[in-house]
Each structure stands twice: as C-alpha cells, then as structure tokens.
Amino acid sequence: MFSIFEILRDNWLLLLVGQYPNGPLGGIVATLILSVLGIVLAFPLSVLLALARLSPWKLLRVPATVLVYIVRGVPLLMVILWVYFLVPILIGRDVSGFTTMLCTLVIYEGAYLSEVVRAGIQSLPKGQSEAARALGHSHLGTMFYVILPQALYNMLPSMLSQFISTIKETTLGYVINVQELTFAANQINNQLLTKPFQVFFILAMTYYVVCFSLTRLALWLERRIALKRLGTAVRQDPGASDLPPAVATHP
Amino acid sequence: MKEFDLLAILLKPEFGLMLLHGIEATLQIAAGSWLLAMAIAIVLLVVRLTGQPIAERAVAAYVSYHRNVPTLVQLMLWYFGIFSLLPDALQAWLSEHNAETLLSIVALGLCQAAYFSEDMRSGLRSIPAGQAEAARALGHGYIGSMRHVMLPQAIRNAVPALVNHSVSLFKNSSLAMAIGVAELTHAVKEIESQSFRTFEAYSAATVLYLAFSLLIMAVGAWVARRYRIVGAR
C-alpha cells in the first residue's frame, strides 16, 4: 500500500505530461488533448451524418446508414488497424501514432455521436418542424434555424457522456504506441518490474477520477437542462397561466 | 500494390487455420464473458433490490468503478496486476490453463456485468409503481408479483439495451489481443505480417466481426418482436 505513494512521488511527472520537455507530450495531458480534439472534430461530422440519415434523399440516407452500421459492428481496434494501414497510403507519407489515433476517434465517435444527434432531432415535437415549414423555411433551413439549435442544446449531457467514452477509448492508442496515460503507466511498469498491481491500480484510479467527475458533471447538466426546459415550457404556454403550475419551476 | 486476392489467404491452410482458431478464441471469450456478466448482473440486481443501504452502496461502487475505468485498463489490471497477487498454486494452475483467455473472460465479464445490471435495473424502474401495487392488491406476494407481473415487463423493456451492450461486449473481446490472446484481431495481424496481404487480411476480419455483430443485433430484434406484449404501448 505504501509503495503506491512512492511510485506516485517518483513518477507523477511522467503520468502527467509524459517525457514532454525532452520528448513527445504524453501522459494524462496527451490523453485529454486527444479526446478533446477527437470529439471536437467528430462533432461536425456527426451532425452531417445525422442530417444525411434523416434526409429525404435516398442517395444520402443509404450510405450514411451503412457507414454507421459498419462502425457500430466493428471493434475500435479493427478501425485503428485500418486507419494505420490506409491513411499513409492515401496521403502518401507516414503519419504519427497520435494522428492515426485522432483519425480513428473522429471516424468512430462521429458515427456514435451521429446516433445521439439523430435521437436528439427525433425527440423534438413534430410541431416545431411543421411550424418552421409553414413559415416558409426549406428542409435545410428548418434544420439549421429551428431544429438543430434546440436539439443540440438538449443533447449536451449525452455529448458529455460520449466525451467520457472517448477518453476511455484513447487507451487503445497503447496498441499502436501512442504516448498517452496507459502508455506512460506501462513505461513505469517496465522500469519497476516488481510492482505491477500498484502501477495499474494507480492507472485505473486516475482514469476513474477523471471520468467519474465528468459523469457527475453530465448528471448535473442533465438536471439543469430538464429544469430549464420545464421552466420555458410553462412560461410560454398561454393556457398554463390560468392553472396553478404542476411543478415548482424554480425551487 | 498487389491486386486484391482474398483466396490467397483463405485457401492457404496455415492462414485459414489461424483465422479459424482466431474466430474460435473470439467466440470463446465473448460467450464466456457474456455468461459470467449475466450471472453477476442478476446477483447485483437482486442485491440492489433488497434495499439494504450498505449493499446498495457496494453495488453502486462496483458499477461506478467498472463504468468509469477503460476496459483495456481493467484487463491490464487483471492480467499484469491481480494475477501477480494470486497465490502461487493458483498462478501455476492458471498458467497451465491458458491464463490470458481465462483472465480476459473474467475481466470482460466483470466489466460488462455493471452495464447489464444497470440495463436491467432501468428496465425494472421504467414500470409504473401501480403495476406492483395492483399485483400486491390482487394477493400476489413480493416474489409472485415480481415473477408474474414485474419481471416479464422489465425484461422486455431491457432487451434493446442488453442487445446493444452484448454487441459491445463482443467487440471488446478484441481487446484481449493487448494481453496476448490469439483471438481474431491477433490472428489477422499475424497473417498480415506473414503474407503482406494487409488489405485482404483486414477485410476478412472486418467482414467476420460485422457479420457476428449484425447477427447479435438481428437476434435481439427477433426476440423483441417475438415476445412483445400485444397491445402494449
């Protein structure tokens, strides 16, 4: 038990930033940068994919649906291997493990996030799009000015949970030697050799602290958004002013 | 680049055999950890239903740990960490009996049990309390109301989530490669490095994974349709 603190004291910098000043950035900072970049770049892709899956044109709907099903049916590790093999051929030069992992995350998370976006769009009341169409918006205009702003706001908690999965998925970069937290822990383990349990316990707890706090944040956000929607729904409904509010909107 | 020739891999006995062994190991891990996960998930659910505060806390902590720590890290903790703490006799026995496969079944099973138990719990919670009250009012005991009224509805509600998580369990079996199990992804990498036919090898694995995943989804959809409650909302 005591050796856990000793390992932490000797190696906290490696776990935090890897060999940064003297080598590539690694550790938990690289994990977080990788996940943030992954989810930020996957987001526009996912909105486009969701719009394609909901579009009235078959030419867009079918390929998007096929892509989403392929990604959902194949392990992330297999996608990593494909990207590792195909991207250098397509762009004609070698790419780093970090870039490979980033491309993989964008494809994989783009597909999963598109399901979240699609659910968010579909969960809006139909009257919203009907009203927008009646006011003269086109299909795309309806999406961009009326549906997406509401759907994306309501989806914030789900997107945060997708971000948590992304953090967990960056661990697979270990297989192609991406310098991140899992890689750093394996480096420490290879140096010490005698304390594998302590090293991997530290690793597990580090991920736990990061992901657990984000999970709590997602829960808080979910409650807040639910309350806010309830509040605006009651205020905007003219019929509601005659009746006492069913739920205390701002406790 | 050589032209695409899938048969060059499939028909060569050594590669074909590697692929078959890979599929076998993948299915072994997936099926073994699925059964383990289901068994533990049911135990966790029952413990939670007892309503003992301490037991509930313990289950919540179990679920929280397994959902917030990456699966690969859990696998490494079992294979590199916990394995080294086991008594020597058990270590020797495990090493004789394919320790990598057994430990990955344990790690993946324990991890997925957390997801399964949450799916079942939310299936149960989605049933209005009136159902249980009505069953009790009609003279059922606690067990009877569970068995005849609550569980049949809860299981049906939980099926879609359980199917999704079964697919991700199947896909997670590929993580066992990282601790040296010769499952499908591992076999394909091996074939690739021996034959240099990367495109063919990866295509074969991708199609196989996709086929099994779609099969699981199709079975799930069939079960949901076959056992749906006619007239239910």
Image (cartoon, rainbow, N blue to C red):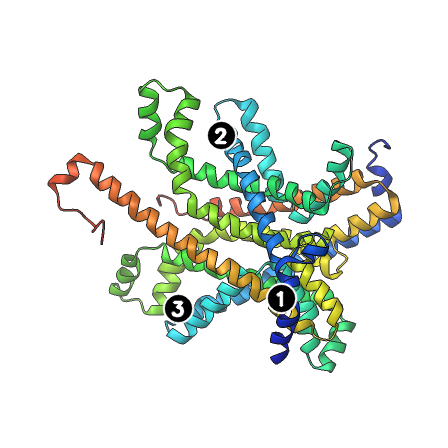
Query: Image quadrant of residue B153?
Result: bottom left
* Mark 2 or mark 1, whichever is nearer to me: 1
Q: Viewer-proximal residue, A44 or B77? A: A44
Q: Quadrant of the N terminus of chain A?
A: bottom right
- The residue type indicated by label 3 comes to Leu
Residue at horizontal 26 percent and vertical 60 percent from the top: B134
Q: Describe the element under mark 1 as helix, strand or loop.
A: helix
Crowding at dot 3, Cα within 10 Å, few <14 / some 14-19 / many 20+, comes out as: few
Residue corresponding to mark 1: A12
Q: Is residue A142 above or below residue A185?
A: above
Alpha carbon separation for disc pair 1 and 3:
41 Å
Residue at horizontal 60 percent and vertical 75 percent from the top: A5
Residue corresponding to mark 3: B49
- The residue type indicated by label 1 comes to Trp
Numbered label attached to residue A51: 2
Q: Quadrant of the C terminus of chain A?
A: bottom left
Chain identifier of the residue bearing label 3 in the image:
B
Q: Are marks 3 and 2 on the same chain?
A: no
Percent x, y for residue B205? Answer: 73, 44
Mark before the other along the chain sequence, 2 or 1: 1
Alpha carbon separation for disc pair 2 and 1:
44 Å
Q: Viewer-proximal residue, A84 or B82? A: A84
Label 1 with label 3: CB-CB less than 8 Å: no
Crowding at dot 1, Cα within 10 Å, few <14 / some 14-19 / many 20+, comes out as: some
Residue at horizontal 52 percent and vertical 41 percent from the top: A113
Q: Are marks 1 and 3 on the same chain?
A: no
